[in-house]
Amino acid sequence: MAPAADTRLARAAALVGGARRLVVLTGAGISTESGIPDFRSPGGIWTRYDPRQLTFDRFCASAETRRLYWEMGNDLFPALRDAHPNTGHRVLAALERRGGLLRIVTQNVDGLHQKAGSSPGVMIEIHGTALQVGCLACGARQDRGPVQARFAAGEQDPRCACGGLLKPATISFGQAMPERETAQAAADAAASDVFLVIGSSLEVYPAAGLPRVAVDNGAALVIVNREPTPYDADADLVLRGSAGETLGAIAAQLGLSLSDA
Ligand code: APR
């Protein structure tokens, strides 16, 4: 590794390892090494589906949009359901066990942080979860598998027992953000002393606004991402490259054990 990169890695390990209130924001880039496509890279989900067709209003108004949504689920849900966490997820779980990690705010809906051992109490799934389905009328939640199977068996517009529309429990474009989680994420960012972004293009708000909240409140900002982001200039450190490799190297410098607890 070039000396500069080595130094950057050592500085990142010192910041992350020395944090008393570390807040981590993860995006789809932490899960690509688990076989789940991200959204905006070549071959990403938004290069295969048009997000403008999949807004919340369209979902509610059109049976055809709901069919497209469930069809997309036929394509993407099995990989999501069966994916395994990778080194990046396991390093964050180890950082929690070590102490000093205040929160993981994830934009991801794949549940891989929890599969890696991160406690539900430390997690904020700010865009919901694709592993469950919610009723838009009564709010009842259920596992997605059986409902996705009903669609695959021919039920084109799956309904709740109450008659309401069923929707994957993710937050779609145009859908209200979860108020409590969003406020908590902003409060945690403001309280953080180190804010670590992993695998996000930082293009979708309000999540993309969290680094600014952290920096404005005095936190050091570290970004680990394969591509440049709009917040690179505000960062104390930018580590360009693979999330798994970079986090694995930081864990090695900190002597973290990645075995599941
Ligand atoms: N290591 C490091 N970075 C990676 C890796 C990897 N293995 N794989 C991908 N990346 C980077 C990409 O270069 C990209 O900059 O991760 C970023 C992923 O960006 P997006 O695909 O835009 O995903 P994300 O930032 O999570 O999107 C935010 O957009 O459509 C909505 O709800 C969706 O939560 C999602 C939100």
Image: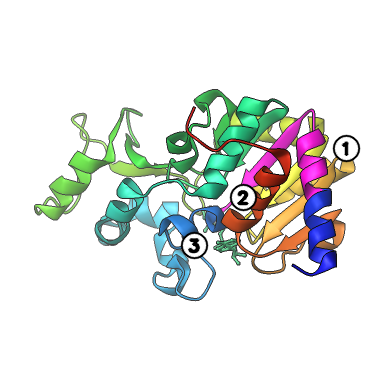
Query: Real-space Cα distance between discs 3 and 2?
Result: 20 Å
Q: Is residue 36 visible?
A: yes
* Residue on which disc 1 sits: 217
Q: Is residue 206 left or right of residue 178?
A: right
User: How crowded is the residue under tag 3: few (<14 C-alpha within 10 Å), some, or many (20+)?
Assistant: many
For discs 2 and 1, the disc positioned in front in the rendered view: 2
Circle 2: element type: helix
Which numbered dot is residue 38? 3
Query: Looking at numbered disc 2 in the image, what kind of residue is underneath it?
Result: Gly
Question: Contact, CB < 8 Å: mark 3 with mark 1?
Answer: no
Query: Looking at numbered disc 1 in the image, what kind of residue is underneath it?
Result: Asn
Query: Looking at numbered disc 3 in the image, what kind of residue is underneath it?
Result: Asp
Q: Is residue 36 above or below residue 126?
A: below
For discs 3 and 2, the disc positioned in front in the rendered view: 2
Q: Is residue 107 visible?
A: no
* Residue on which disc 2 sits: 248
Which residue is at a point 76% across and 64% down the rendered structure image? 230
Q: Does label 3 or label 1 sit earlier along the sequence?
A: 3
- Disc 3 CB within 8 Å of nearest ligand 1 atom: yes
User: Residue 182 versus residue 93: which sits nearer the camera?
Assistant: 93
Question: Contact, CB < 8 Å: mark 3 with mark 2?
Answer: no
Render colour scheme = rainbow
User: How crowded is the residue under tag 1: few (<14 C-alpha within 10 Å), some, or many (20+)?
Assistant: some
Quarter location, residue 93: top right
- Provide the residue span drawn in magenta: 12-27
Q: Does label 3 or label 2 sit earlier along the sequence?
A: 3
Circle 1: element type: loop
- Residue 80, position in %: x, y? 35, 51
Which residue is at a point 81% across and 34% down the rendered structure image? 18
